[in-house]
Amino acid sequence: MPDRLRVLVIDHDPTHRVGIRRAIELSSVGADVVELSTPDEAFAALAAAPADCVLIDQDLPQKGALMVVTSLRGDRNGVAILLITGLQDEELLQQAIEFGVTEPARCG
């Protein structure tokens, strides 16, 4: 296992990305955080180098988060995928798990 984890944060809101980055950097987890605003940026980043963990905003414009999860799962079965949502929607959370999310995380 590498000394540092590579974590991708996919969220269209730069404030959310910065907050997540800071939380990870202040934790005891040794991680390099890559901030991305679109699914296409995420796929390009993953093509360049693998990630250990992907945190993805449920409310992505363009392609829906669950479609992105499906694509990620198809190519990278070992990566941990966390879906970040502010919604209290149990059906969405169950659907996310069925699509391959490792862990849904409620925020807010």
Image: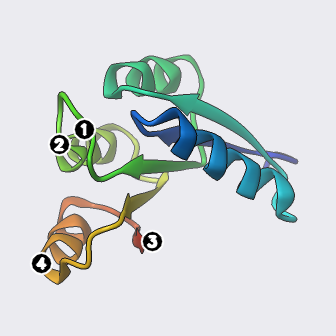
Disc on res. 108: 3
Callout 4 amino acid: Glu
Which one is earlier in the sequence, the residue at label 2 or at label 4? 2
Left or right? Give the position of 104 relative to 30: left
**Residue underneath mark 4:** 91
CA distance separating discs 2 and 1: 6 Å
Q: Is residue 42 visible?
A: yes
Which of the two marks, 3 or 2, is nearer to us in this view? 3
Which one is earlier in the sequence, the residue at label 1 or at label 3? 1
Which of the two marks, 4 or 3, is nearer to us in this view? 3
- Name the outermost residue toward the bottom: 90
Disc on res. 67: 2
CA distance separating discs 3 and 2: 23 Å
Which of the two marks, 2 or 4, is nearer to us in this view? 4
Which of the two marks, 1 or 4, is nearer to us in this view? 4
Residue 51, image quadrant: top right
Callout 3 amino acid: Gly
Please, what secondary structure does the residue beneath circle 2 have?
A: helix
Please, what secondary structure does the residue beneath circle 3 have?
A: loop
**Whether label 1 touches label 3, CB < 8 Å:** no
